[in-house]
Amino acid sequence: MNILIESAQMKQCDRNTIEYFGIPSLVLMERAALGVAEEIERCMEHRSFQGEALLVCGVGNNGGDGLAAARLLWQRGWNVTVVMPPEFGKLSAEAKIQMDILKKYQIPIADSIPGKKFDVIVDALFGIGLTREVTGIYQKFIVKMNEMEGLKVAVDIPSGIHGDTGAVMGTGFYADLTVTFAFAKAGLLLFPGAEYAKRVVVKDIGIDRHSFLENIPGMYYLTKEDLLQIPSRKVRSNKGSYGRTLVVAGQKNMAGAAFLCAKAAYLTGTGLVKVMTAEENRIILQQLLPEAILDTYNFPDTAKGLAESLGWASAIAIGPGIGGGDVSLLVKIILKNAKVPLILDADGLNIVAEHLEWLKEAKTTVIVTPHLGEMARLTKTEVSVIREKLVETARAFAEKYHVICILKDARTITALPDGKVWVNTSGNNGMATAGSGDVLTGILAGLAAQGMKPELAAPVGVYLHGLAGDRGANEIGVYGLMAQDILEGIPIVLKEISKEGKQK
């Protein structure tokens, strides 16, 4: 589990490293510059020519990183062109030292971008501290760099991108590679910043978790290693060893939602799945998923007999394709009586949007999984506002209703009631397809049924879902990706992770 950091936290880490631990700022700058130079050479290692590198540097410490990287590349045989705005008097102390070093090496510094071709264009204009719109000469520099051909590299963060939100501050640098330092910055993973940062490499420069002085941030992102936390299979076990998932899904003509959710739970590893659905779906589901136990709605008798199913289940998923009407009573009863982890999705969320007090009355951990439209209904807020404030919206809803909130978007946000947040980095735009959310709900229920704590199952399930979708996209592309392709990716990803875990 990797820490994701905001600008103010990174600045404090810098100060703590320099002032408390006593590591000079120039040492950190040299290590940052070395990281940039190393990544550039790694990308260009097969070149059979003397490289031409353009480094456009600002007047702060981000510019100082760029100036130091220019020297290192020059010492490695690159033809280096350094450009800075005509504001040398405003240089930070460290940037001025780096500029003086360049002058002693007789490496010239220009104040305009020449009209020649470069193999590499390095953006070191602004760091994570940018809080206002880019204008003037800086805007012209960024526009010009974007128009140029060659490998585009951003130092720490693409200039013009807000370090916390990923917002574009008027104009942003489009990087092919972003070399950031110590920790990934939130603005590099959140959209639209992620589009500008593209491939992000985090380099160690001597700042680590110790630099927080125990004030560890509460924002994270996962990697494949985190999937090793999924409960392992026991040699001596049976179907009851891996939990029982109750799936309440599918009104008439919506059997697919129930199937996708239930099969995802099975493919994630749960031992038994019971599907409670409309009577009209019985034959379809028995054919599609004969492994599932089947129960059907029969109001009001279903509501009266629900206690048995609730007592049977290790985890419950409710909502995919259930519609409204009488089923609203099921949602109410389950929320008020369930004592095992509960995943609430789709129509379940639309029903609860008119009865938010039910969330507060729940006696168990509830995971809600709204997309932007569903969150708009839950919060009575415009989608455009939510899209600009994904983290804040998810965190506020989780805290207010004491639920785990999975806010689905290109970068899905998982927020816990205590304020912790995960930004998901897996997945692709092919997953914007019917049934994808039903698969996610089944994955979450399957993990929770196996005993994985909901606060961990939520971000891990989201990440696994995205990886399964990526697997499918690699096979057939994003245009033809369907929910069943995501299903097929689940066991493949889990198999790969299991092999990697054994090798370690």
Image (cartoon, rainbow, N blue to C red):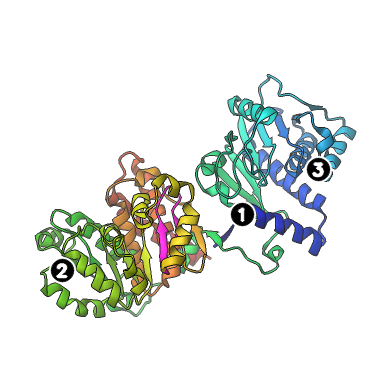
Is disc 3 in contact with disc 2, using a CB cutoff of under 8 Å?
no
The magenta-colored residue range is: 402-414
Q: Which residue is mark 1?
A: 6
The vertical placement of 219 against 305, above or below, is above
Residue 28 x %, y %: 77, 52
Q: Which residue is mark 3?
A: 92
Nearer to us in this view, 146 or 503: 146
On whether residue 192 falls in the magenta region, the answer is: no
Q: Amino acid at mark 1?
A: Glu
Measured in 3D between alpha carbons, the distance from the residue under mark 2 to the one under mark 1, in whole angstroms, is 48 Å
Nearer the observer, disc 2 or disc 1?
1
Residue 180 x %, y %: 64, 48
Residue at the top extreme, as displayed: 115
The vertical placement of 101 against 4, above or below, is above
Sequence order check: which comes first, mark 3 or mark 1? Answer: 1
Q: Which residue is mark 2?
A: 294
Residue 331 x %, y %: 24, 68
For mark 3, give the secondary structure. Answer: loop
Measured in 3D between alpha carbons, the distance from the residue under mark 3 to the one under mark 1, in whole angstroms, is 22 Å
Measured in 3D between alpha carbons, the distance from the residue under mark 3 to the one under mark 2, in whole angstroms, is 69 Å
Mark 1 residue crowding within 10 angstroms, few (<14) / some (14–19) / many (20+) = many
Residue 269 seen = no
Rendered image quadrant of residue 82:
top right
Residue at image location 75% in from the left, 49% down from the top:
31
Residue at image location 63% in from the left, 25% down from the top:
144
